[in-house]
Amino acid sequence: MRLHRVIAIIVRHSYEARRSMDRVTDTVFWPVIDVLLWGFMTLYLAKRGEPRIGAIGFLLGGAILWGLFRSFQRDMAIGFLGEVWSHNFVGLFSTPLSITEYMAGLVVINLAKALAGMIIAGLAAWMFYVYNIFPALPLLIPYVGVLLIFGLAVGIFVTALMVRYTTRLQSLTWTVTGILVPFSCVFYPITALPAGLRPVALMLPTTQAFEGMREALAMGTISGQRLALGFALDAAYLALALGAFIYLFRAAAARGLLVKIG
């Protein structure tokens, strides 16, 4: 892997992020909207005297961290789509650039964008609802790591499907998080799910992260069990995603599909 090629990918996508209104909106606008929506819900519950102690923090903290996961997963796939939409895919890989260098550059730039969105969402929660998540970040950073690794795995898998089956599946870029959110226990504990769905939820790293987040905010401690299970599931899903990407990329190259999508 050559560092200058990775840096070139970072620079290329940073220019696009600054000059594209769609990228600015995804990074800044939607995280703030999520915080505002859930903030209004917490105000409504507070007026009715219904929220338990810490429930407001659970809702706003969940909205902020879910926005981080969704942004990172989505932008990993959109980075690939951007090359396809600009008809740059074939030209990009006709150079000495390797797929590993390309993916490394995407990870760095999209991680920076996702963290920027999380910080902006945190500032919005502080400004509008006097909820400050930043003092709790040292406890939440391990769970952020769980979310980011799973977001990377999902982004790589969605990209692999688009490489093999072309942009017919590009809608998965935006819809896959919608499929995952009911089972990820972002805004409610796993006990709120029907008994038949709980095994599905327990197989998701996101569930372990958000259950751990609530424990951290409520008790000020990190659950080693949830963290270990979250990272173990991350490792399994990331290995599956990378294996699928390598297999589908080679299959697409063998069938000449890389030329068609680029």
Image (tube, grey):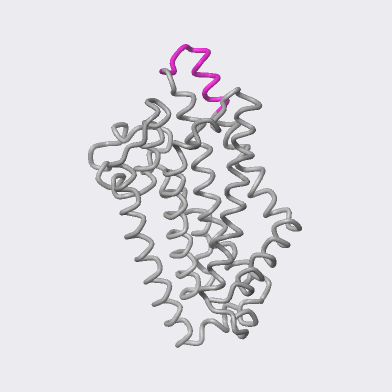
Q: Is residue 86 above or below residue 111?
A: below
At horizontal 47% and vertical 36% (from top left) the residue drawn is 62
Total labels: the figure holds 0
Which secondary structure dominates the residues rendered in magenta?
helix
Which is more toward the observer, 171 or 253? 253
Q: In which quarter of the image is the C terminus?
A: bottom right
Q: Is residue 259 left or right of residue 187?
A: right
Q: Is residue 24 above or below residue 154?
A: above
Percent across and percent down for residue 124 are 64, 32
Percent across and percent down for residue 211 are 36, 36
Q: In this view, does 2 lie to the left or right of 218?
A: right
Stretch in magenta: 39-52
At horizontal 36% and vertical 43% (from top left) the residue drawn is 207
At horizontal 64% and vertical 68% (from top left) the residue drawn is 7
Farthest residue, direction right = 19
Q: Does the magenta stretch include residue 51?
A: yes
At horizontal 64% and vertical 69% (from top left) the residue drawn is 9
Q: Is residue 209 left or right of residue 155?
A: left
Which is more toward the observer, 74 or 150? 150
